[in-house]
Image (spheres, helix red, strand yellow):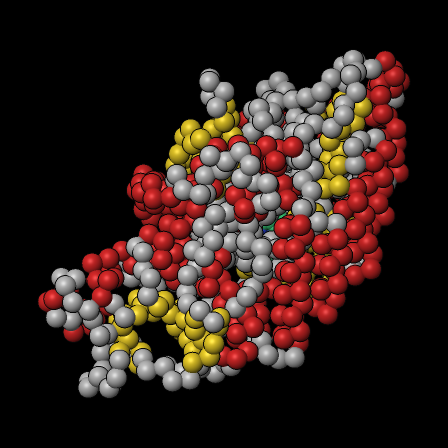
């Protein structure tokens, strides 16, 4: 893991002091709410329905056990005993008092964490996939470049008041588990035949009101030019992005207005001025940062473990969990474990209690190298578990309520906080998620359905990525009451696609039934073991619509 | 303009007797004294010699956020003052304009921020090359002075410090060419 040196420490501590002073000036009336707003957002502080919410960055989703314990401490002492892990590798605390924010940030700084730029119209937390550094299908660990980008974008004075927020994601595996096409900048890291480290740069992705997938502006950018190239993109955006309408201010709108070729030309022209300057990365810096991400001291193990094998054979429940909640590891004899934060109706997706956090911290120390990851599906990952330890990990995870064997399945729902917390919401998300989870509690049925992603956003800001869920649910407002629009056919990863609306919106109480009918249609038309999204692609929307709405009318 | 902070060799100081008049709209008649004019009006008032870059101008130039700094290139040597506007402190275009003027176009003279200029953004402005700050009228410039320093660590780079931290970190230059 990256470790702070005196510069990193100084920056974070000075920032805490600065924000403390700003909070004080807000409290004594020197700063108006309007003046304070962007300052607090750039420090991760939102005002929600009932209280302040603090969003803490977990850069590129990597967390130590020590840091996790600090999050547990914050949940326990400053919040109501839990935190919410988000789709952007952050954690949100929902019940925060303004007067305590300085103390919380100071606690975080002690363990090399912060909330800087987790919100606001600036470059946000740099994200990557949860399995960075360990995935079997990974080409390169993207985290050194992510850390370099994190530093470069933190309090970068020219780019703190962009037209709109700016999200960058980087990935380097066969499968894109970082949703890079949905980001303002998506970076794909690879090597050419000669072994040189290169980047493919995608710009203008984003969901929200105008869902668009990113488009390629540059192929084969040598890694040394990463910072200057991004600087060029940001300068073009800062100068020319729209500022007259908040809903048209993301870079995707600029790229669309100019056309991707013209946009790429502007960037290229700007880049020519700066590309060989001091922003060019050095081998020394890459090596300095990469050293922090060097592989831990893995044991030389055989890839097949006898105890693991017999546990699988002897314990069907364990075998079921192992079939769904593990990810293949680069190193023989190890696996990455996904801890599900979606136990069903008992707990909203992404919510983790202080006691669970402490349990996870301990698991990571005992059966790993004290490291934890955050997946953008809102689950947690133990990246380095020996196969021989999997059974013990499973048992402990089960006690902690984190072993629901549903990763990638229908009940592994991605949901935003919605109307229960968020003041922008049209409708609630959490009760919808819980109602669906209750309907699909039968594990055998769930597993028969195979891979199926379901995302619920409480409004068109799309915090839960509903457009790219195989099934997407969007809260809409109809004359002041809460309705839900349903899309199908969305997908993430390299085969990203935006879902299509099946028809008129539904009331909350109808949703579990609607999902069931979608699933029944799928089962009726499914060929072999094909996943839901393939069936939708093959047969189109009509059969689904027909079944959902015909029965709808019949029952009305 | 009053309520002004300037950076000088002796550090930052308050200026109470600044002579410049910021003319936002073409007024008739124009006020007395040195004028800070929008680009179109500035052009109108200059002699051919000034426009051809052969003579100095008496008028300062106020660049609106959507004006292109590159257009000023022919006249830069003869300008007494350039002001960049923050129509709202949340509008960050002037930071990039300042970068371009200082770093790419080589502007050495006074670069003044005008408009919604507030304490909590002054350090960013300073990093981007502003050396004069016309603090919003209803705010205390003396108080705003406290915002000039900002955070001492700069990870990336800026007009004041063109080398990113990775070139300045202790030991970073060991194997640099
Ligand atoms: C509860 C407080 C929250 C508020 C007020 C909020 C607000 C917003 C707004 C206004 C947008 C749209 C911005 C735009 O399109 O320009 C947005 C986008 C987004 N939010 Fe949130 N959000 C909140 C919580 C969350 C949570 C809990 C998550 C993760 C589960 C999240 C993840 C995202 C993501 C990933 C996007 C980007 C979607 C895109 O690509 O356009 N947000 N949020
Ligand atoms: S999608 Fe809408 S309701 Fe949900 S968290 Fe985002 S802004 Fe709030």
| Image x and y of residue A106, in percent | 73, 59
Does A290 sit above or below residue A73?
above
Comparing A541 with A277, the one in front is A277
Using the rendered image of the protein, determine whether residue A304 is visible from the camera's viewpoint: yes
Residue shown at the point (56%, 73%) measured from the top left: B146
Does A279 sit above or below residue A390?
below
Relative placement, left or right, of A268 versus A295 is left
Residue shown at the point (81%, 48%) measured from the top left: A69
Does A11 sit above or below residue A316?
below
Relative placement, left or right, of A194 versus A488 is left
Q: To which quarter of the image does residue B16 belong?
A: bottom left
For the N terminus of chain A, the quadrant is top right
| Image x and y of residue A275, in percent | 39, 40
Residue shown at the point (79%, 27%) measured from the top left: A385
Relative placement, left or right, of B134 versus A505 is left
| Image x and y of residue B36, in percent | 28, 75
Using the rendered image of the protein, determine whether residue A514 is visible from the camera's viewpoint: no
Comparing A239 with A342, the one in front is A239
Residue shown at the point (49%, 70%) measured from the top left: B11
């Amino acid at each position: 893991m990256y470790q702070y040196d005196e510069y990193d420490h100084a920056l974070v501590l000075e920032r805490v002091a600065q924000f403390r002073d700003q909070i004080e000036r807000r409290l004594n009336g020197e700063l108006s709410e309007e003046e304070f707003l962007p300052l607090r957002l750039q420090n991760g502080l939102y005002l929600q329905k009932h209280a302040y919410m603090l969003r803490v960055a977990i850069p590129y989703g990597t967390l130590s056990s020590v840091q996790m314990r600090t999050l547990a401490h914050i949940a326990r002492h400053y919040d109501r005993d839990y935190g919410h892990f988000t789709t952007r590798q952050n954690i949100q605390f929902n019940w925060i008092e303004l007067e305590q924010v300085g103390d919380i940030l100071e606690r975080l700084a002690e363990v090399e964490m912060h909330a800087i730029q987790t919100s606001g119209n600036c470059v946000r937390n740099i994200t990557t996939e949860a399995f960075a550094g360990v995935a079997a299908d990974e080409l390169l660990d993207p985290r050194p470049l992510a850390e370099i980008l994190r530093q470069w974008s933190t309090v970068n004075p020219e780019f703190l008041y962009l037209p709109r927020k700016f999200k960058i994601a980087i990935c380097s595996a066969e499968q894109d588990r970082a949703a890079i096409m949905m980001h303002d900048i998506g970076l794909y890291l690879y090597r050419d035949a000669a072994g040189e480290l290169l980047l493919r740069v995608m710009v203008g992705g984003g969901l929200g009101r105008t869902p668009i997938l990113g488009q390629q502006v540059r192929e084969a950018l040598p890694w040394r030019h990463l910072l200057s190239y991004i600087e060029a993109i940001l300068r073009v955006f800062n100068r020319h992005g729209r500022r007259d309408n908040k809903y048209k201010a993301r870079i995707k709108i600029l790229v669309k207005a100019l056309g991707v070729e013209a946009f790429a030309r502007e960037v290229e022209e700007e880049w020519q001025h700066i590309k060989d300057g001091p922003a060019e990365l050095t081998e020394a810096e890459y090596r300095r940062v990469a050293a922090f991400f060097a592989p831990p001291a893995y044991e030389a193990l055989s890839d097949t473990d006898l105890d693991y094998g017999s546990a699988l054979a002897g314990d069907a429940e364990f075998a079921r969990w192992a079939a769904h909640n593990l990810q293949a590891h680069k190193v023989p004899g190890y696996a990455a474990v996904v801890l599900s934060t979606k136990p069903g109706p008992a707990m909203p997706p992404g919510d983790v209690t202080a006691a669970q956090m402490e349990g996870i911290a301990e698991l990571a120390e005992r059966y790993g190298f004290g490291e934890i990851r955050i997946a953008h599906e809102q689950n947690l990952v133990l990246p380095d578990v020996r196969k021989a330890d999997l059974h013990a990990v499973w048992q402990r995870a089960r006690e902690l309520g984190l072993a629901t064997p549903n990763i990638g399945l229908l009940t592994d729902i991605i949901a935003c906080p919605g109307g229960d917390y968020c003041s922008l919401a049209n409708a609630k998300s959490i009760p919808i998620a819980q109602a669906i989870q209750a309907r699909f509690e039968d594990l055998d049925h769930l597993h028969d359905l195979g891979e199926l992603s379901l995302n619920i956003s409480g409004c068109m800001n799309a915090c839960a990525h509903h457009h790219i869920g195989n099934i997407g649910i969007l809260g809409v407002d109809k004359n002041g009451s809460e309705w839900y629009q349903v899309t199908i056919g969305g997908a993430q990863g390299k085969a990203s696609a935006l879902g299509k609306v099946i028809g008129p919106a539904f009331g909350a109480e109808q949703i579990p039934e609607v999902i069931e009918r979608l699933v029944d249609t799928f089962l009726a038309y499914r060929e072999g073991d094909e996943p839901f999204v393939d069936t939708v692609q093959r047969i189109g929307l009509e059969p689904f619509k027909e079944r959902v709405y015909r029965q709808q009318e019949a029952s009305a | 303009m009053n309520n002004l902070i300037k950076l000088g060799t002796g550090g930052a100081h308050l200026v109470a007797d600044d002579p410049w008049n910021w003319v936002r709209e073409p007024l008739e008649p124009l006020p007395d004294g040195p004028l800070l004019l929008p680009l179109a009006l500035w052009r109108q008032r200059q002699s051919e010699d000034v426009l051809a870059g052969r003579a100095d101008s008496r008028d300062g130039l106020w660049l609106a956020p959507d004006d292109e700094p590159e257009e000023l290139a022919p006249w830069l040597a003869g300008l007494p003052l350039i002001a960049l506007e923050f129509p709202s402190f949340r509008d960050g275009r002037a930071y990039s304009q300042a970068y371009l003027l200082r770093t790419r176009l080589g502007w050495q003279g006074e670069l003044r921020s005008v408009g919604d200029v507030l304490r909590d953004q002054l350090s960013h402005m300073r990093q981007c090359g502003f050396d004069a700050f016309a603090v919003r009228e209803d705010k205390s410039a003396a108080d705003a002075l406290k915002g000039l320093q900002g955070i001492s660590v700069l990870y990336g780079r800026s007009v004041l410090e063109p080398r990113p931290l990775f070139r300045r970190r202790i030991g970073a230059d060991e194997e640099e060419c």
